[in-house]
Amino acid sequence: MRVGTIVAARDAGGRRGKGSGDRNRAETGREGRAVELERQYTDVDGHRFHSVQAGAGEPVVLLHGLAGSYRWWRYTLPDLTDRFRVYAPELIGFGSSRPVRRAPTGIGELAELLLAWLDAQAIERTHLIGHSMGGQISIHLAAKWPARIARLVLVSSAGIPRRLPLPEVTRLLSEVIPPRAWGRTTFLPTIARDALRAGPRTILRAGYQILSDDVRPLLACIESPTLLVWGRLDPLTPLSHAWQLADGIPGARLEVIPNAAHNPMVDQPHRFIEVVRAFLLGDGDAA
């Protein structure tokens, strides 16, 4: 059994101390709501998670994607804090989360580490929102430990392998390399900074883990109400994958956002938060 321990946080002056939070950084959401973020470090089975959190209410956990950080939720996190306690852990190897002894060996192990992180936070049951690689990990969590996940949101989720012949690989790269593949150009500096911080070895290893894992056998085991949110222009996780996931998860529904690519929470933040917030609050659920 993996065990997690909250080891330290940093206060506004940068000093490490038990239970102290860094409230010096603020994020602003789509409605101009600024929130102060509390930072925390948690040791789990030889790995150190960095996370930020804010708000009050039912817990919501946000999982970023490959080469990301909590900053990928900059437009989402603030607009949930009036109704939810929002947590944004950084996956091991990305952001400020680091493996102490070794890197995780696969998506399944990352899901186990996140489960232990939830235990360390004393979160028995949470809403879970996962983007790309974070969505893939979220599928493992929801399928293997269904009692722990209340509502599940999968955003441009990975998890369906793509075995492409060389001409298709060439075509995919031609779509991925231009900035349009990543949506809003003002977000590109964040993408570049996080990728440089992670380093090519970590990104390549995680990319291999993503492509080696097929979540389709897990989909029927998901019991949580599930919403899939996809950018219509996404070249990295195509819309056909969204339909496969939606068809495999009992009762899941799909929301496609126009004029959004792989990061709909950044490309169209107003529409994204509107859809996700309504789902988490149960608006429109059958009586």
Image: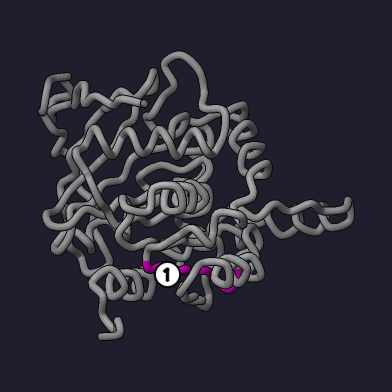
First to last magenta residue range: 225-233
Horizontal placement of 136 versus 56: left or right? Answer: right
Q: Position of residue 286 (x, y in %)?
A: 30, 85
Q: Residue visible at 34% across and 51% down? A: 62
Under circle 1, the secondary element is strand
Q: Residue visible at 68% across and 55% down? A: 176
Q: Is residue 240 above or below residue 138?
A: below
Taking the magenta stretch, the answer to whether it contains residue 229 is yes
Quarter of the view holding residue 114: top left
**Quadrant location, the N terminus:** top left
Horizontal placement of 145 versus 28: left or right? Answer: right
Query: How many numbered badges does the structure rendering display?
Result: 1
Q: Is residue 270 above or below residue 194?
A: below
Q: Of the residues shown, which amino acid type is indicated by label 1? A: Leu
Q: Which residue is mark 1?
A: 227
Q: Position of residue 194 (x, y in %)?
A: 47, 38
Q: Residue visible at 42% across and 69% down? A: 227
**Quadrant location, the C terminus:** bottom left
Q: Nearer the viewer, residue 92 or 121?
A: 121
Pick out the residue farthest to the top.
Answer: 101
Q: Is residue 93 above or below residue 132?
A: above
Horizontal placement of 60 versus 102: left or right? Answer: left
Q: Position of residue 205 (x, y in %)?
A: 62, 31
Q: Nearer the viewer, residue 175 or 285?
A: 285
